Amino acid sequence: MEKVFIDGLSFAMPLLVMAIGAIYSEKSGITNLAVEGFQGFGAFVGALVAVILMPTLGDGSQTVIYIAMVAAFIGGGIYAILHALLCINFRANQTISGVVINILGTALTAFLTSTANKIMNGDSSNKFILGVCDRFTIPGLSQIPVIGGFFKNMYAFEFIIAGIAVAAWYLMYKTRFGMHLRACGENPQAVDAAGGNVARTRFIAVMLSGALSGVGGICFAYSISANFSPSIYMGYGYLAISAMIFGNWNILPTAAVCLFFGLAKSGGYQLCLNMGLPSNYSDIFMMLPYVLTLILLVFFSKKNHPPKAVGEVYDKGKR
Amino acid sequence: MEDYIVEMRHITKRFPGIVANDDVTIQIKRGEVYALLGENGAGKSTLMSMLFGMYEPDSGEIIINGKSVKMRSSNDATAHSIGMVHQHFKLVDNYTVAENIVLGMEPKKRALGIFPMVDMKKANEEIAELSKTYGLEVNPTDKIEDIQVSVRQRVEILKMLYRKADILIFDEPTAVLTPQEIEFLLKIIDGLRQSGKTIILITHKIEEIRRIADRCAILRRGKLIDVLDVKSTPSQEMANLMVGREVSFQAHKSEGKFGDVVLDVQNLTVQNSAKFDVVKNVSFQIRAGEIFAVAGVSGNGQTELSDAVYGMLKAHSGSVRLMGKDITDLSIRERCESGISYIPEDRHHTALFLDFTLGENLAIRRYYKEPFSKKGILKFDEFNRNADEVIERYDIRSGQGRKTTVRSMSGGNQQKAIVGREIEEHSDLIIFVQPTRGMDIGAIENIHRQILAERDRGAAILLISLELDEIMELADTIGVIYNGELLKIAPADTLTSMDVGRYMMGVKDA
């Protein structure tokens, strides 16, 4: 049972940071299907920096992980400029731009990973071997019956993401920037008339979205897979998008949905183990989060209120 | 020398294919109410948009308080104390009143002495204070989506005042208001003038200018025609100058001769997609030769009512009978053929194929029948003959006659085409929904004449309009709809527009 909580939370947190990224972009009025691509490219940049630093700082060094997270943040942010340029400056269709960025992300990281490997150690493997992030157990809290499992064996990045989530909430709901950002997604004309800069606000939001997705990506690489390759990100970005939608584009409910997805995934896996089913059955249980997504869609779709102006190209002259 | 607060000298602004403003010069005195009068497309809004920094003029000069200035964005306008209430409000629906007002210049504080954040408590207090000072009652914590149109307008006014604007531009402020609300607004504007503000009022309603304006500039097709002193100019002269010819204010309506009941609606209830009753247990009858007008504030169920009569929405309960025949469950085409014509509210969405030619659009009601088609083959000679006839009869102006793509035509001519097409059906019942929306005096006059002609021919007419003037002018019988219910049905000559306005706000008979 404890294992379900431990694994559930460690899957939920990277998902949450990506979902928050998606929320930032969509609340500003830019449809973001590019989360998948952002996290892949961000994770690639993080992993590349990590494998470059590892020989000097040592294979087991935790410092490398933190540097890699910063690198993934920056890398994701920079990759997101592409989406921002296409959607804001060139007024491209935002859905198509998102999809293209995902496909490009997979191809680009595959190519760059094998090229980097070839230069660094001569083999053209499409993997960076990374290792795993350290784990902590919080004394006291972890002794609580049942839910104590949430506080055992936590990855260091889970704390960082929790911090990011609080900061993101504060920025979104308490500051000027957040107020403008949300207004841009509802009625950009109003922001314009009030003297705000719609294009700039949206640009920053999309970049932030990419940066946060990058962090999510590198955290997956440092936990589930212990390496980076283009095949490790398989639909988690889309899962983050559905978490955002079920969370009604608000950070708190989205966090709850992410946790729910995490528990569904780890719970399904444990169930499979406990029943002693052969390993090929585990694939069926791994589908659980996606099946739940389908079911949730039926119940939640009607009550949702996406930002009003999301997906619309902002045209100053439109009346 | 006069104390001009705003001067716009020799302003010219071109858009592709049109000169919106052609060498316009206006001078506005400090503390006056200055009206800009003109038909749609005369260039009033464009001129003011340039003053507010939304466009830049191609040539000409803007002078504020004696200094030549460049207006590059609304920020520049705000910096020069200019504020504008746009025709389409620029409000964020899910923000509170206060959040909307302070947007862009939020009061700040620091949480725990470090983190910058918006001080909403202070904002709410400031707004409450401001609202009291100017008598513009709002509740700062209400969300925009929960408040009425007239209150939203107050929010827009407060937005300007919060930014300390001295020059206030109102773009068609009364278009969306009931008579009582217009009264209130005009009082507010007067109050603002007395507190020293300069007001520019864009309108095409002469009555309002009469009430509050000191001077009035008349624009026609982008050119400044004249600047008049309101007190010494008769309304008729203003109207003539605005349109460029003699106009008559009153449509000549003859005594009604009512025949048998054509449309009989009994206990009709219509639900929207959320299963909510939007038309509630409505009953009324329209006789041949009668104009039955439904008055009401937008969104009270009038669109759904007309859609249910025409069959675009299904009746949830109740019945609709046309000439004694129950049509409640008939399809739209069956209803058309039973004798209903429909001029819908949204002409682009429901009445026209914008990328088809005018000729095709004019045949759309009958294309599947002889002589327009034989054995499934379309007969284009017949299309053309029909098109030329209708174009001629209804004076539909377009670039290339029947071959014109409808999208490229002006709104007024598109509407003429729809009205022509529908009237040519010689139906027993004609439904007009907002037939003159967005049209100017000349075109309105023309459509009103046609509605009256159809009435005199003996058609039953269901007129749904948000323009109370239009209803008062045309209706034989008025039904006031409020929140989906027909609150009052009475002969038009027993009601004044103030009475109707009261029912529109939901006041029931004692």
Image (tube, helix red, strand yellow):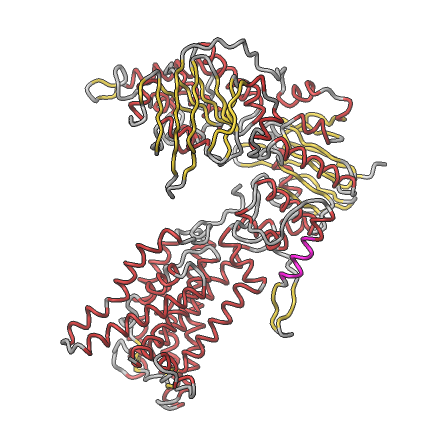
Q: Would you identify the image quadrant in which residue A66 lies?
A: bottom left
> Residue A75 colored magenta?
no
Taking the view exactly as shown, the residue that stands out farthest to the front is B510
Along the viewing direction, whichever of A269 and A131 lies nearer the viewer? A269
Which residue is rendered at x = 62% and y = 43% of the image? B56
Q: Is residue A109 in sight in this rendering? A: yes
The vertical placement of B71 against A247, above or below, is: above
Taking the view exactly as shown, the residue that stands out farthest to the left is A278
Residue B222: x and y, percent? 62, 30
Residue B234: x and y, percent? 73, 19
Residue B330: x and y, percent? 29, 26
The vertical placement of B159 against A55, above or below, is: above
Highlighted range, magenta: B120-128
Residue A146: x and y, percent? 34, 80
Which residue is rendered at x = 41% and y = 70% of the image? A17
Taking the view exactly as shown, the residue that stands out farthest to the right is B1
User: Does residue B99 appear left or right of residue A9 in this picture?
Assistant: right
Q: Is residue A107 in sight in this rendering? A: no
User: Does residue A205 appear left or right of residue B4 in this picture?
Assistant: left
Check the picture and name the quadrant holding the N terminus of chain A. Answer: bottom left
Along the viewing direction, whichever of B176 and B23 lies nearer the viewer? B176
Main SS type for the magenta part? helix
User: Does residue A267 appear left or right of residue B253 in this picture?
Assistant: left
Query: How many numbered discs sit on the rendered protein?
Result: 0
> Residue B127 colored magenta?
yes
The vertical placement of B209 against A159, above or below, is: above
